[in-house]
Amino acid sequence: MNDCNKIPTNSPLDKLLKGGIESDAVTNIYGEAGSGKTNIALLCAISVINGNKKVVFIDTEGGLSFERLNQLANGNGSHYLKDILLFEPKTWQEQCKRVKKLNDLVEQENVGLIIIDSMVSLYRLELTNDNFHQINRDLSKQYSTLSNICRSKNIPVLVTNQVYSIAGKIELTSKTIGRYWAKTLIRLEKLEKPGHRVATIVKHRSLPEEKHIEFVIVENGLKEVGKFSIF
Ligand SMILES: Nc1ncnc2c1ncn2[C@@H]1O[C@H](COP(=O)(O)OP(=O)(O)OP(=O)(O)O)[C@@H](O)[C@H]1O
Ligand SMILES: [Mg+2]
């Protein structure tokens, strides 16, 4: 058992999670396209860099936009970018190799957060009926590596997952693996009211399930929507 710190996300998730994401566990944020996963990842990165640590950002789907980073950093995007160790694997094999190398990277650099945005987009491209078992073994191995890093080094890991409306057997397997390894699971959903989203705790070691918070995405971050909010 580690002495776990919480890392602020600089977003309404800090209120939901009583301070932020846990440093000794994998946090998995999932939700449909545009629900705010990459925004939260970037806000978390900014928070960790403000604490003078570097951030490993494994971007598997070209989601990291400098323009958006710059907006969230109030025009200081370049300052933050230099402390982001950015990797952009283009295939599932490249992603597997990159995750394996993280053990060495965290020994060499002062890393305060590892982000994988998103975990299974390349997995989905690679899957066939024939390689199903091997690819799932690869996925479990990646999660195991990530989990060992957070537990032994107290470096938080944030992974995102997109949800797809047609969930087949393959989809369910990757979900089951992801949910097993993550100690915190957060679901993001878009609400009917334009721009409104809700983040809900699906799994947590010390907070109740179904606790949720409503928010909107604005130029410089995410804002909670309260009862008397102008949003
Ligand atoms: N400057 C801004 N002001 C307000 N909303 C913004 C701004 N920039 C981006 N957004 C909103 O953020 C949303 C996209 O969020 P984000 O990229 O975090 O989604 P995501 O969950 O990562 O999606 P995907 O699964 O496609 O990667 C869009 O609805 C977009 O309109
Ligand atoms: Mg994204």
Image (cartoon, helix red, strand yellow):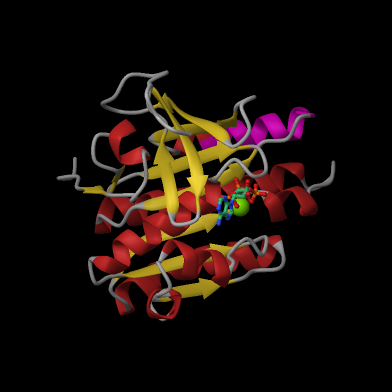
Q: Which residues are magenta?
A: 166-178
Residue 76 location (% of width, % of height): 40, 75
Residue that appears at 67% across and 43% down: 33
The picture places residue 90, in percent across and down from the top left corner, at 71, 68
Q: Nearer the viewer, residue 80 or 139?
A: 80
Q: Along the line of sight, which residue is nearer the eye, 2 or 57?
A: 57
Tell me if residue 168 is in the magenta stretch.
yes
Left or right of 32 on screen, residue 81:
left
Q: Is residue 137 left or right of residue 4?
A: right
Our reading of the magenta stretch's main secondary structure is helix
Q: How many marks?
A: 0
The picture quadrant where one finds residue 226 is: top left
Residue drawn at point x = 44 percent, y = 46 percent: 222
State which quarter of the image contains the N terminus: top left
Q: Nearer the viewer, residue 207 or 214?
A: 214
Q: Assess whether residue 100 is covered by the magenta stretch.
A: no
Q: Residue at x 19, y 47 (%)?
A: 5
Q: Residue furthest right?
A: 129
Q: Position of residue 165 (x, y in %)?
A: 76, 30
Q: Residue at x 41, y 60 (%)?
A: 114
Image x and y of residue 144, in percent: 45, 49
Q: Is residue 69 above or below residue 123?
A: below
- Left or right position of 21 against 71: left
Residue 109 lies, with reference to residue 154, above or below; the image says: below
Tell which residue pokes out farthest to the front in this image.
230
**Viewer-closest of 140 and 27:** 27
Residue 141, visible in the rendered structure: no
- Against 61, residue 139 (above or below) is above
Asked whether residue 149 is in view, the answer is yes
